[in-house]
Amino acid sequence: MAKAIVSPLLERGEYNPENVLGIVGKSSSIEPALNDLPKAVKVVSSEDSFSREIWNAPLKILAVKPQQFSKIKELDSIFQSKDDFPKPLLISVLAGITLKSLNKAFPGHTCVRAVPNAPSLVSQGLTGLAWDDDITLDQKKVVRKIFEPISEIYELEEQKLDPFLALTSSGPAYLALVVEAMADGAVAAGLPRQLSNQLAHKTLSGTASLLREKSLHPAEVKDMVASPAGTTISALRHLELAGLRSALIEAIVLAAQKSRQLAEEISS
Ligand SMILES: NC(=O)c1ccc[n+]([C@@H]2O[C@H](COP(=O)([O-])OP(=O)(O)OC[C@H]3O[C@@H](n4cnc5c(N)ncnc54)[C@H](OP(=O)(O)O)[C@@H]3O)[C@@H](O)[C@H]2O)c1
């Protein structure tokens, strides 16, 4: 995720590669991390003593797994609260790590929580942002500029990031499941596998474009496709009986609850 964020910024010349430094966990990860990045970018492992200097950079993007955050918390002694204005900026993309936990781990920093999603990898993402109250207008601009090349940006109150994540970050997994199941259905009904996979995913992207470009409500698309006593309404009747809509509603509520629960576990 860190690379997906940094690469387009380097491609656009927003940052000088010589000023971009990275830390990975293991030294074996350095080479894959550098792959496709400009030569001047430097990456070291967390064991390397130079990593302490990198941790003192004025702008940091934290993109470890949430389970690896406990290791990062141990670094708090290297950050001394100074009277710098503006304070160094720490942007975290970790699911479920609250601004309160980030402030504890990064004393003297202005902290930002960013929730990007997987389509950011193809520059079609959505990013939710919540920040500390002391963030300056210029710092907000810096943060927006980081996520703009890969995503649309939504500024939210922190507690809204849980449902935002449940819909947008987990959403690609729900939709991938639906696409896979639709392709399975076509195979069961007699189409070849490869063609079914291709048609299922093109049906998804075509429907998304139809909704967006004609500004339609989802119900309008459903009504447009379902003719009286036809094939679609028989299938929809079955999906209602099987509880597809209710299953998706509950799935998103559960994902939001889980995100809150993880945040409580990590901060306790
Ligand atoms: N993937 C997504 O779609 C997505 C979307 C939104 C948010 N996120 C968030 O993005 C974060 C990263 O996800 P990812 O899929 O990019 O994970 P990832 O590929 O496993 O990347 C994590 C990176 O952190 C490094 N790391 C581990 N311990 C470290 C330490 N002590 N010091 C410095 N670096 C360390 C890892 O290096 P090693 O491999 O050497 O350990 C690895 O390069 C997660 O918190 C996730 O919640 C991901």
Image (cartoon, helix red, strand yellow):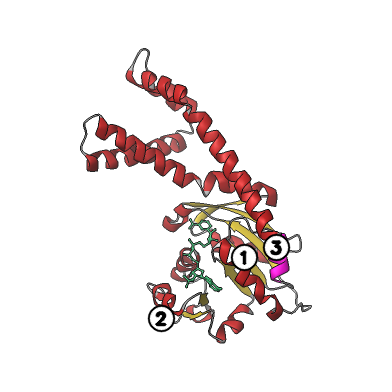
User: Viewer-nearest of labels 1 and 3?
Assistant: 3
Q: Is residue 141 above or below residue 39?
A: above
Q: Which residue is identified by label 2?
A: 39
From the viewer's side, name the closer residue of 47 and 30.
Answer: 47
- Callout 2–callout 1 Cβ contact below 8 Å: no
Q: Is residue 234 visible?
A: yes
- How far is mark 1 from mark 3, CA to CA? 13 Å
User: Viewer-nearest of labels 2 and 3?
Assistant: 3
Q: Earlier in the sequence, mark 2 or mark 3?
A: 2
Q: Residues within 10 Å of mark 1 (few under 14, many from 20)?
A: many
Residue shown at 53% from the left, 29% from the top: 246
From the viewer's side, name the closer residue of 8 and 229.
Answer: 229
Q: Which residue is identified by label 1?
A: 91
Q: Earlier in the sequence, mark 2 or mark 1?
A: 2
- Callout 2–callout 3 Cβ contact below 8 Å: no
Residue shown at 57% from the left, 48% from the top: 165
Residue 103 is covered by the magenta coloring: yes
Q: Which residues are magenta?
A: 100-106
Q: Is residue 198 above or below residue 126?
A: above
